[in-house]
Amino acid sequence: MVQEAQPLPESIKEAMERTPQAFQPERAQGVNATIQYNFTGAEPGSWVVKVADGKCEVNEGTADSPTVTINSPSDVWLKILRRELDGATAFMSGQFTFTGDMGVLMQMPTWFGQQ
């Protein structure tokens, strides 16, 4: 069965709202992680993505104790999600920062079908 490619997200809000549809639970078995996104720039805001028990939940707001926190201009993160910019390259060149578990940060693309 071939899945039709969805149009690329036009905004961070659209990308965040689509995250549960992109989630691939078979690639995140045993994962229990809370990812905090703090966006600046054109679309400022905070989002929380929780991955646990084969489910992915997304909400606007902040988490008490996230596993990893990503701080990024919204346009940079949107380019990463649209695969117009490599996440590792963006990090190495200082386009976004993070705190917390680097292993979770590195595994995230696998959970959402980007690798």
Image (cartoon, helix red, strand yellow):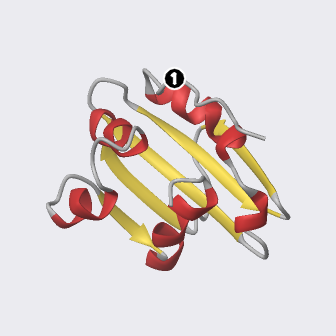
User: Residue 98 falls in which quadrant of the image?
Assistant: bottom left
Q: Residue furthest front?
A: 1
Q: For residue 24, what is the image quadrant?
A: bottom right
Q: How many marks?
A: 1
Between 20 and 98, the one lying in front of the other is: 20
Q: Which amino acid type corresponds to the residue marked 1 in the rendered image?
A: Pro
Pinpoint residue 21: horizontal percent, then vertical percent: 71, 38
Q: In the displayed structure, does residue 43 sit left or right of residue 28?
A: left
Compared with 5, 90 (above or below) is: below
- Of residue 57 and residue 108, the one placed in the foreground of this image is 108
Residue drawn 22% across and 61% down? 89
Q: Residue at x 19, y 67 (%)?
A: 92
Q: Quadrant of residue 34?
A: bottom right
Residue at 63% of width from left, 60% of height from top? Answer: 111
Residue pictured at 29% horizontal, 64% vertical? 88
Residue 15: x and y in percent read 53, 32
Residue 46 visible in rendering: yes
Q: In the rendered view, would you say 109 is above or below 7?
A: below
Q: Position of residue 67 (x, y in %)?
A: 57, 69
Q: Left or right: 60 with respect to 99?
A: right
Residue that mark 1 sits on: 7
Residue 64 visible (yes or no): no
